[in-house]
Amino acid sequence: MWRRLFHNAGWKIGSLGLSILLWFAVVGEPELATIHNVPILYKNLPKGLLIGSNAIDMVRVELRGPTSRLTSSALAEVAIMLDLSSVDGAGERTFTVSDADIRLPDGVTFLRSIPSQMQLRFARVKSKEVPVELRFGLPLEPGLRIVRQEVTPQTLHISGPENRVDGVTSAQTDAIDLRGLRQDSEIRVHTFVADPQVWMESPPGVTVRLTIGKQ
């Protein structure tokens, strides 16, 4: 037993001494408070719901701890993690930030968040088909006119927050420059939806076929 106890005694004594020095180094550090900007991450968002545009992506947190634990590098990966699993439908919900929502380095404590609460608005996802609306830029040369115009596909699939999708009546093409066209033409052009909160589910490009004739 004594042999086991004193086996590698030098290493054991050295490790013990190093641990004691580290303990004194940490305990001997002055304890300070700081305010640090941290990002907000959202987890467990229920399917079929979206977080509204009112959501904030950064808060300020007041922390306390040893000087070496409050450096920018030590706090680089600190973030607020809000659990949205309790959200059961569209509408508003208020969340209070607590120390359970943030993971901190050892020895650092959470004092408060600024703001301490955040109100989020949730919306249901809605999809629908909308017609493609052609837009034209420079006109044809004098004496020419568009006899016929076709677009393929004629409708595009869009998605987004329910109330925003309801307000979209069409997907528009980029302005098509007609100057210089003197004969029937087939043009590939991109489309867009004016509302930035609504996105295209269909490929955004369409093919436009124009039949050109004389006036």
Image (cartoon, helix red, strand yellow):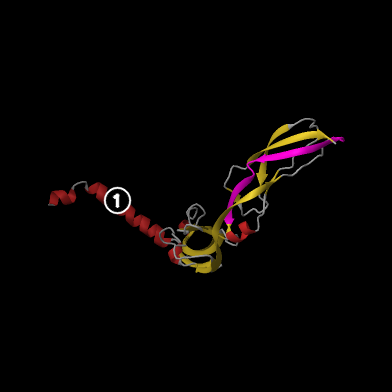
Image position, residue 52 (x, y; %) = 58, 61
The image quarter containing residue 154 is top right
Q: Is residue 196 visible?
A: yes
Say whether residue 144 is magenta: yes
- Is any atom of residue 31 visible in this view? no
Q: Which of 181 and 44 is in front in this view?
A: 181
Q: Which of 202 and 33 is in front in this view?
A: 202
Q: Quadrant of residue 145?
A: top right
In which quadrant of the rendered image does the C terminus lie?
top right
Query: Looking at this rendering, what residue extends furthest in the right direction?
Result: 142
Residue 140 belongs to the span the image colors magenta = no
Residue at 49% over, 55% down: 75
Helix, strand or loop status at disc 1:
helix
Left or right relative to 81: residue 160: right
| Secondary structure mainly formed by the magenta segment | strand
Question: In percent of the image, x 60 and y 62: which residue is there?
Answer: 54
Read off the residue under disc 1: 15
Magenta region: 141-160
Residue 143 picture location, percent across and down: 87, 35
**Left or right, residue 214 beside residue 165:** right
Q: Is 78 left, or right, of 193 in this rendering?
A: left
Compared with 190, 161 (above or below) is below
Kindly identify the residue that appears in the image at 68 percent across and 52 percent down: 194
Under mark 1, the amino acid is Ser
**How many numbered discs?**
1
Q: Residue 43's x, y, as percent? A: 46, 58
User: Which x, y percent locates residue 157?
Assistant: 59, 48
